[in-house]
Image (cartoon, helix red, strand yellow):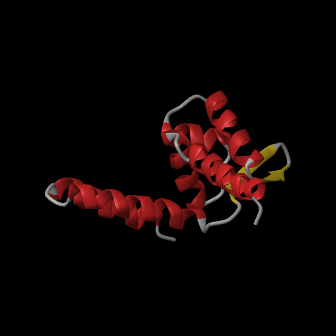
Amino acid sequence: MNREKFNDVFLSVSDFFSLLSNTDRIKIIGLLLKKEMDVNDIHKAINISQSRVSQHLRLLKTKSLVEERREGKHIYYHVKDPRVSRIIESVIQFQMIGFTSDKETISLMNELFIMWHI
């Protein structure tokens, strides 16, 4: 692999992790892994403005993490590839290593891990 293509791969990986660096986007992905939702449902579930939800969904859609399905005037969103949950699960497990002495945090992280596991 030539150096330019190698750098392109690293840039792509970096862009992906930048996409996941926003708490609201991770929450949205978590919701959409469980079921299809529209902007209003997501807005109510994570308590951010509908316009902000739309901005996050637009970005997630542009980066091919989320797809939409139209039904009349409604647009429903879902995660395009559920394997993204494995990445987040891995990060949660990795983070648990730093909290081995805090039983309450470990318990919470175990709950998060179970939530992400589909």
Residue furthest right in the image: 72
Q: Where is residue 14 shown, x and y percent of the image?
A: 61, 48
Q: Nearer the viewer, residue 106 or 19?
A: 19
Report the side of 10 relative to 87 (left or right): right
Quarter of the image for residue 19 reads top right
Q: Is residue 65 visible?
A: no
Q: Residue furthest bottom?
A: 118
- Residue at the image position 57 percent from the left and 37 percent from the top: 43
Residue under the image location 54 percent in, 38 percent down? 44
Q: Is residue 106 above or below residue 49?
A: below
Left/right of residue 71 with respect to residue 95 in the rendered view: right
Q: How many marks?
A: 0
Residue 25 vertical position relative to residue 78 in the rendered view, above or below: above
Q: Quadrant of residue 106?
A: bottom left
Residue that appears at 39% across and 64% down:
113
User: Where in the figure is residue 15, as x and y percent of width and height?
Assistant: 64, 46
